[in-house]
Image (cartoon, grey):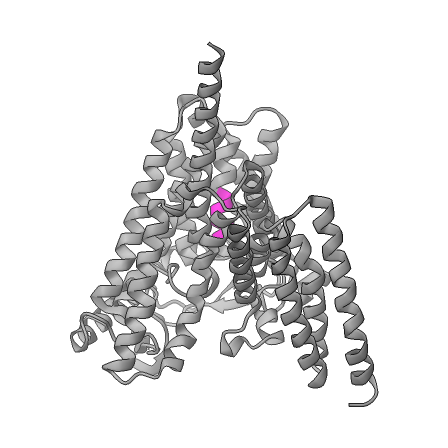
Amino acid sequence: MTGVPRVVTQSYYRVVSGYYRLAESIQDYFNLSRRLNLLIFAIALLGSIGIAVSVQYEAWVGTILLMLVMVMLPMMTVYPELIVVGILLCVASVVSPFLWDRIFLGDRGITLPNLLISLGLVVVLFRHLTSKASPGKLWSSPSTIAIIAFLILTVPVGLLYHSLFRGWSIRSQLSEMEYMLAWLTFFIAIGIMRTERTLHNLQVGLLFVAGIGALATVLQALLGQRAVFFLRLAEWDIPVRDTEGLLRVLPPGQYLVLVSMVISAQMSTVREGPRRWGWIALTALYGLAIVFTLTRHSWFGAMLGLGLIWLFGSSRTKVNLLLIAFVTVAVVGSLTMFARPAWVTQPTDIVAKLQRRFISTFTEPPNRYTYGVPSSVGQRLFEMQYIMDRLPDSPWFGLGWGTKHPLRVTKSPYVGSTYEMRTYIHNSILWILGKGGIVGLVGLLVLLLTGTVRGYMLYKRTSPDKTYVRSWLLALWISWLMLLLAAQFEPVFWTKNRLVAPAMILALMEGLYYFGTKNTADSQASETQTR
């Protein structure tokens, strides 16, 4: 090596030495144990090896990123919630998985979210080894058991069966199953919940990251893809896609935005003064982003969520929610009526587009704007019939996780022409049933039922005096029901980074209930001692 590679190779030792000094300073300042510093040492050693390899192959982007990770690692060790927020940021921020997958080896499963998840698991492991573990009740909760059961019945069982008895390549299956790593975000979140402050940071991080994605989505729809400088970075991440002759703005963290909208709407009904108006503003931002996605299951989910908030609320809450709905409709309506989205292909306003998109859920009339595609419900029924016709080939363990489910889709039913087209199964239950069979479906149903029953029980068990905790639990439970509805139209519980949303819902539900009841028990114990 000569030139720049040689200089970088010689100087990276100095970077590692400076990193060690930084780690020792943080260790002394926060009075960390020596064993916890083993994590910093181990990651620094691996990072230094990675830097040497990246310099040898002149991969300068990788070199810079590895150096940044080594600098940030001590801070992540002290504030591990930054890892979870970082995972959410990679899923729902302006620049998210598409860019990171290009920088790393996304086609081989080596993505930045997966790297952060691996780092988070190591941090949780070393914190447990150094007596900085989270409460044991979080690890033995029904949500934890349900996720473990689901992962076992899908990943190792399906992988071994299709590899040993059906001759599927392990590599072809792993390329499809590596996205299941996003479920491990749940274990990272509960593994770092040692204090109520950490839980609060995770809550704020969720709303903040979803706000970034929602704001970028709204600007992308109103101003265009290159109107604002940071939207140029998000050109591939928040695309404007032509569907059924309409332009849809698709944020990568769509379900996190949906969950955050329900949380902000619920909190606006129980807060007073300026805080209430702040929550209302957040609700309007999240709601406007959901509108511009032109995604029907998100609309239905939002309507279900707001309806349940109104149903479970008190009389005062119902009145407040009507006021919030009026303000939200006024803000969203004024923006959509007077600010037409950029790059429109049809001379119709956004209201007409919303109407067409809603109607096409059940029927698709052959007018001059249509592409002749079947309705959304019709497409899902066709996919269900496709799975049922092929499931008898392997009913217990499915068709295999590596199959792509080729479908023959009728693109122009009104004129009778058809095209061969490969698409995916939209329904989450059919997705798991087709790929994992009855065994995989059992694991999914256990997870879905556990989240539904557990969320409602935690909400009912919480004392009415705990208004803040009770409101968050209600919002999270409603968010889980919304994801169940969305799962009938999209594979929410399987594919890619959509899994972060249900994982965070379960983690926050368990954490909020534990610390809420713990504080109540501590206060009762102190009162007993005082007497």
Q: Is residue 10 left or right of residue 231?
A: right
Residue at the outermost bottom position: 1
Residue 468 spot, x, y in % from top left? 50, 30
Q: Can residue 514 be spotted in the picture?
A: yes
Q: Nearer the viewer, residue 344 or 151?
A: 151
Instruction: Point out the stretch of residues depicted in magenta.
Output: 255-261
Which residue is the extreme one toward the front? Answer: 34
Measuring 38% from the left and 51% from the top, which residue is drawn there?
483
Residue 88, horizontal then vertical, whole percent: 55, 55
Q: Residue at x 76, y 52 (%)?
A: 25
Q: In the rendered image, which quarter is residue 487 located in?
A: bottom left
| Residue located farthest toward the top when viewing the structure as drawn | 531
Q: Is residue 406 above or below residue 242?
A: below
Q: Is residue 342 above or below residue 284?
A: below
Q: How many marks?
A: 0
453, above or below 12, in the image: above
In-image side of 161 versus 501 (left or right): left
Instruction: Give the residue at x 34% y 65%.
Output: 426
Residue 147 placement (x, y as % from top left): 35, 55
Residue 258 part of the magenta-drawn span? yes
Foreground pick, 184 / 404: 184
Q: On the picture, is 227 further left or further right than 494?
A: right
Q: Is residue 510 left or right of residue 293?
A: left
Residue 331 makes an appearance in the image: no
**Near-viewer residue (244 or 468):** 468
Q: Report x, y in % for residue 126.
A: 54, 55
Foreground residue, 419 or 364?
Answer: 419
Residue 223 falls inside the magenta stretch: no
Quadrant of the rendered image containing residue 385: bottom left
Please tell me whether the stretch drawn in magenta is mainly helix, strand or loop. helix
